[in-house]
Amino acid sequence: MEALKAQFPATNFTLLAVVLALPLIGAFVNGVFGKRLGKAGVRLMALSALGGSFIAALATFLLLPKGEGGGTLAWTAWRWFSLNGRMGQTIPIDVAFSVDAMSATMMLVVTGVGFLIHLYSSEYMIKDPGYHRFFAYLNLFCFAMLTLVMADNMAVLFVGWEGVGLCSYLLIGFWFGEEKNATAGKKAFIVNRIGDFGLLVAMAILLYYTGSLRFAEINANARNLLDPVTIWPFGNLPIESQWDAANPSANALYKAIVHLFLPEKGIQVYASTLVGLAMFLGAAGKSAQIPLYVWLPDAMAGPTPVSALIHAATMVTAGVYLVARTSAVFLMSPAAMATVAVLGCATAIFAASIGLFQHDLKKVLAYSTVSQLGFMFIGVGVGAFAAGFFHVFTHAFFKACLFLGAGSVIHAMHARIHDTDKSQDIRNMGGLKKYMPITRWTFLLSCFAIAGAPPLAGFWSKDEILWRAFSTKIVAPEVGRLEPLWTWPSWLGQTIYWVGVVAATMTAFYMFRAYFLTFHGEFRGWKVVAGWKEPKHAHGHDDHGHDDHHDHHDDGTPLEGPKPHESPLAMTLPLMVLAAFAVFAGFLMAEPIHFEPLGHILAPVFTRAHDAVVLRGEGVEKLMWPMMGPGVAAFLAGTGAAMVVYLNKGGAPEEAFKKAAPGLYKLIYDKWRIDELYDAVVVGMVDALADIFTTADKWLIDGVLAKLTAAIVAFFGTVLRTFQTGRVQVYGAAMAIGLAGVGFFLVRPHADATVDDSKLRSAGEVVISAAPGPGYEYRWEGTGTEQKDFGPLREVRINVNPGETKDVKLHVRNAFAQEATHSFAITRPGRGFPSSAAPVPVVPGGVVPAGGGSIPAKDIPGLINPRGAQ
Amino acid sequence: MTVPLEYFVIVAAALFMTGAVGFLIRRNLLVLLMSIELMLNAVNLTLVAFNRQYVGGHAGQIFTFFIIAIAAAEAAVGLAIVLAFFRLRSTVRSDDADLLRN
Amino acid sequence: MSPLDLVFQYWPAIGAGILGALVPRGDASTKQRAGLGLIAALTTLFVIWLWPTEGGAQAAQAAEAAGEWPHLLNLLIALPIVGAAAVLFIPRQMLSVLRGFTYLVLGIGFVASLWLLTVPMTAGWHFQYIKDWMPSLGIRYHVAIDGISLWLVLLTTFVTPIAAYASFGSIKTRIKEFCFALLLLQGGMIGAFLALDLFLFYVFWELMLVPMFMMIGVWGGADRVKAAIKFFLYTMAGSVLMLAAIIYLVWTHQKLTGDFTFDYLALSRVVLSKNAQIICFWAFSLAFFIKVPMWPVHTWLPDAHVQAPTGGSVILAAVMLKLGTYAYMRFSMGLFPGPASNLSANLAGVAILGGILYGALVAWKQRDVKRLVAYSSVAHLGFVMLGLFSATPTGMQGAVLQMVNHGVSTGALFLLVGVIYDRRHTREVDEFGGLAKVMPIYAVVFLIVTFASVGVPGTNGFVGEFLVIMGTFLSERLGKFAGIHTVGAAAGVILAAVYMLYVVQKMFFGPLTNPKNKHLPDLTVRESLALAPLVLMIFVIGFFPSIFLDRMKESILLQHNQYKVVSGQAILFADERDAKLLPEDTFSPAFLKGMPKKEKPAEPPAGAEGSQAALGGEGKVAQ
Amino acid sequence: MNKVELAYFGLCSLIALLGAVVTVGAKNPIRGAMGLLSTIIGIAGLYLMLAAEFLAAIQLLVYAGAVVILFLFVIMLLGPSAQSKRDARGAVARYVGAAALLVSGLGAMALVMRTKSVTPTALPAVPPQFGTIESIGHELFSTALVPFELSGALLLVAVIGAVAVARGKQVDPTLLPAADAKSSQTSAPTAGQTKEARS
């Protein structure tokens, strides 16, 4: 051990590289060279990759430094990129991985359960043509999940986060032949993407306030998040008082309407709550909580081992891991934690209710996963991060075992019923305990575990969560003079506890309902005929793919077939291992009996949570054992009821209920019609918006900008075309007319003159100078000196005393003895009436006035006609 | 007393006006060409007349000499065009020469 | 350097080469194996050579760098243009000579552009070359490169040969004119990226239009002429306004300093009067927004793309659109920082609503794949413009990186669309279904490129968008709007997934119903070799973005600081009537290297200095 | 101003003006060509009065000898269709144009007449050798040498141009199918060819 510790220093722990690299290499090799390796080669590659990674993970777990500060093993690959923070400092984002107690356990779960599921699916998918593709995706998924779990900063976590979403897209849509599967894959990816949107916004806020994305630093300066942010009215929208000040003269009605929209005081929220909510949106997307859970039931379209690995053990728990990892941030805002807890609780009860009436075995398990996740979020929501995480740990085992059990049952059913929906329908099953003993016992044990039977794993983890919900309260961090943070109402903890108990009973009920319908009673699949041989004409089993199958046996004759066979060892071995874990894993953190090795390991990770979450009252801890009663009672009630309804009476009461309240039954069976609601509201709205934009784009923007201008130009074109007749004489005539016009203009004399009245105001003196012309002669009138005949005199000086108006006439005669006259009225503003100088054309002074480098701006804008409206 | 300058100018102007009006009114291509010749001759006449007035050199006359040369070339090419046009549209009406119109 | 050391030092490249060679399935031709192996090896070499360290290696490289050969930029610009002229003399029938010559010229261009990477891109201009062109008007042939234009030039020299190689597969008529257009286009584009003299920039800006107009007009689809004309008129209308603004700016500068110059460095000192500044800003920016394309003036892009041939479409998307964004960053933000910063909040709103969300939603509704990809580039470039409007070092770095990303991923997308167009001669999405069974490799490549353009981490799209989103939130220019803008931009990430996965599902998944799709051949050797470098580049940028970011960081910091200081000054001192001249020390000396010096020893007109003294350049540009 | 000179001037200008009117007014182009001939002769006479013997000779030689003959030659070549029938289409534009021209011409002449010189300016005495071939030839080959050479070149070009245009499309007879070898000379269309309807 010491040699290993010496070989791998804590800060540059290259063993992490091995844990990550093996699945990646496995994925690449299987993906690219899979077809050439053949099924055995692919199987060997995939299993060895996961096995090696599991061993490395185990070594990492053992080598974890047990120091008090929560020892972490870190390894940095290379500088990914760097950002510039708010104060201009560069924030390096490295491809760095660090492992502490929590992520080490998660690694064990991912690689351990992953290895078992790889073993299982190597047998389950043996007849599928896309064998190598399946294992490539599965290995890639494990790589992405490990990246997520071992990430040191949120950017690398995000890589894992979306990588996992990508792999679930590929795996759910594995049999892409059928439209249904591809749509389910797309739906899963898009809903996850909505969650990622939340995570992106959370990262932006964290970067802004805490100045870094590394978890260590985020948790360290989480207090910076306690800074109020006005979310409404954003941007330049005024609040009421500002608006009133801005336009006081608005009439009453208009003012009332505006006050309707504008708030009196800007709504302020703490940045920590914003981050919390954004991160919970991300977690909800990934772990299928209330708003974004719709993708998980549809994800059952993928092969069963996929559901086992992704939708039970690893991916869906990523949300819980994220919340646990950034616990310091959540602790900064009790409001966010309350939302997490309440929504978790709502999801638990809601999903459980749907699970009651589902007929598809995998759908039942899917909804049970959603509801169990609800429990985990209750755990982390109430501040019991360790308990929430422990439930993740135990849930991974018994839910994986349940899914694999279901897989083995479906595998058996496939012998004769090839249609995917029928082969998973529990109404076609029954009485399989005779034929599949191992699957039956492992399934039973896991049912006990999930239902919360006392000694088993489920009981310890679920009870721990409910107890913590019941007994603790969260101390809100003090914020000095700012408005104090929202604190939990005292009754919230208890209500969550009791709702949790009800959900637990439901869980017990539907789990045992599924168990009894599948394994007890008589077999409803097909008439079992001893020594039944596969009829020759029937199509071969080559194409195990589910795309273009159709079942031609439904033509009324009862289906015959062989005895349903027990799954081979490769499938039953993982079942047994998982069942064993499901039974004994509970003792890793059995707090009531104070035997909690895992608790001690996780303690350093959640030190901050330890002092922020205290007991509600003094004597509360004494209630620990009594409060376990309701939990156990829930288990007994649920199981008993299921036994009565389905074992003794063979499902009659369910029929009775169906007839009694058909509407309610239908509603619950159709998953409370949430999917239809989402389609109508969210998808419908976006679709309508897209239609509006498309039509606007086609007609409004393209139409106006491109087609309208083109039309205008074309119109002017046709108008001008009529002048071109094409006959020479017409052009000659036009020229002649033009010639005549020019001649006329040239011949006529023009009497223009410029009046320089710059000194009119001061000295009352005006200089009028006439414009020169070819052979022009001038005669002035009214300038005092009479002038009878025309002379060359062009310029005249006139004196005007104040208040007087003088009228000057100018006669011009040209060489052809044509005459023209022009008169000017010069008035000097004196006392008395204002001057009304005749409209005098003034030629703008061209010269640049000296002095000052600046040019008179009045003629600059004139030079370029302002095109844009300002 | 020789014939004064104005008489020649008036005759030239009359000649020019006849040529111009002829050009505008008639639509036979040949007549157009002939009226152009008329206009050119009118101009020649004025040039020679003014050269006679200012006898410093023979600028006017030399100029007329070149105008005659050019007029000859112009007539030759004009007629060739008329011929080609006739071959194309088998008519000499100037109105028919409107291929460029549309 | 014995062969053993060589092997030891470059083992990853050799390993990648062998791996690349092994990838194609059993029956692949040796040409494909050799090609893929070579491409893989070269890409790994590229990564090793520029391995992102803490600047240590860069300093080492600087030591033994061969210095800046001044004529490199002239070579990059002149070679394609001269090549284009030379192509005209090659007889039309000798197709292989034509193609060979084009590959030669483009190849030399690419190798020469790799030389640019040897020099560490410190702030300021590199490989600068100045020569008087029309001294009387003050027009000079002034070209230089800095961090920002470095990667765009490399993108051009990287994408054009690929586009040429791919389009020689599908272009069968008038090969000679196609080579001419291609080479002229490359010369024009590189010239536009490198020009620092406004006149020279305008010349290259217009020169680029002609070959692209030819490409769309001659080798395009059904009504290609209408689309080509629309493309040409849109850009021309914009750039004519820009020309007017340039002339006005030069005229004002002449009034202030007494000598004519079109040089960007000199003109950036001019602070026009308040409304003249806004008018000129809009004149410049409209030309660039048309090119980007931004929301209201984008309708030419889908038509141009739908009608353009594959090669033309790749170049149009990969490089020409970047000119709009690059020019906005360089000239609009450089010459008129005042109005740019005042309007940045509103423009960012347009970029998000009009660009990212609008582009994505309209793309979702398109039935023609190429039109869908065209609208997706409107969305991607909305991100780029948002990065520029946020005016933070992170945002701007994200913007420039996103320009390169968009070039790579959308270029690859257009190549892929070209693949199915060559087979089925239709781009209607409903015509296809269940292609994944018939063309598995094509499906895998399409999926990878789809995830690159959607921005899944590990690919190039993510890094660009992540930087832009972080930059938007940190930006003080956007002030109170930063939050809502970040939410809007992040929402774009969802819609991007929506429309891309929609088209992937419509084309690849689901049952194979259309009989015509039953026997479509998978990727040919030419197509796979054309796509390989782009796909590898997607992962290289995705995993090692700091190769690119380190080289553009300093120039962007310089541009950002200058933008902050000068916009402050411009807003403060722009008064109602008179234009002013900022003192030289408001700009960093590295920026002003190569500014036209006043040859006249005569003391500049007294007035000019007097008014500046009052200004007092207290706003220093932090080096 | 002695009588003989005045009479000679009146005669020549009468011939010229009448010729012009006939050229423009004649329906038959041949009569028009004859009118042109008389104008040219009239002007030649006036040249003689203005002491421009060389020009008078050139006028007669070039104009009368060559240009008018060329006109006649083409008219003969075109035959009867050289005469276009009258119709009033497009008359308005033409007459308006002619009227405008006349008005502006007469107006200008009136203006000129009304101005300054009441008495007509007498022509000065004619220096010896004025207008003779030697003096013009002397001046032609000294000051106006360049225009002279250029006009030579111009004439050459004009000739080549005329030949090229008039020649029309030569159809290589050997290429034609043997049947209509006889109508190889397609360049000269027969008169009977119907004129295609003009829309």
Image (cartoon, coloured by chain):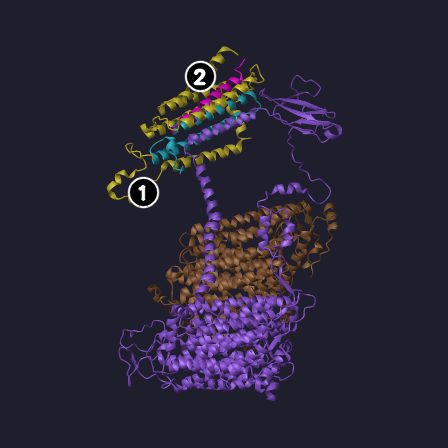
Q: Which chain is cyan?
A: B
Q: Which residues are magenta?
A: B1-28
| Residue C23 placement: quadrant | bottom left
State the yellow chain: D
- Which residue occupies 59% across, 42% down? A865
Q: Which chain is purple?
A: A
Q: Which numbered mark, 1 or 2, is in the foreground of this view?
A: 2
Q: Secondary structure at mark 2?
A: helix
Label 2 crowding class (10 Å Cα cut-off): few <14, some 14-19, many 20+? Answer: some
Q: Find out whether residue C397 is within the magenta segment.
A: no
Q: Mark 2 = which residue?
A: D14
Give the answer, above or below, for where C341 lies relative to D9: below
Indicate the quadrant containing the C terminus of chain C: top left, top right, bottom left or bottom right.
Answer: bottom right
Q: Which comes sooner in the sequence, label 1 or label 2?
A: 2
Q: Amino acid at mark 1?
A: Asp
What secondary structure prevails in the magenta region? Answer: helix
In the figure, the shade used to draw chain C is brown
Instruction: Please tell me which residue lies in front, C356 or A671.
Output: A671
The type of residue carrying mark 2 is Leu
Is residue C89 visible to us here? no
Side (left or right) of A512 relative to A833:
left
Quadrant in the picture for residue A760: top right
> Which label number is shown at residue A180?
none
For the residue pair A453 and C310, the one nearer the viewer reads as A453
Residue D172 is marked as 1
Q: Chain of mark 1?
A: D
Seen in the picture, residue C343 relative to A165 is either above or below; the reply is above
- The one nearer the camera, C531 or A670, is A670
Q: Nearer the viewer, residue A698 or A551?
A: A551
**Mark 1 and mark 2: Cα distance apart in space:** 52 Å
The vertical placement of D150 against C322, above or below, is: above
Q: Position of residue A867 (x, y in %)?
A: 57, 45
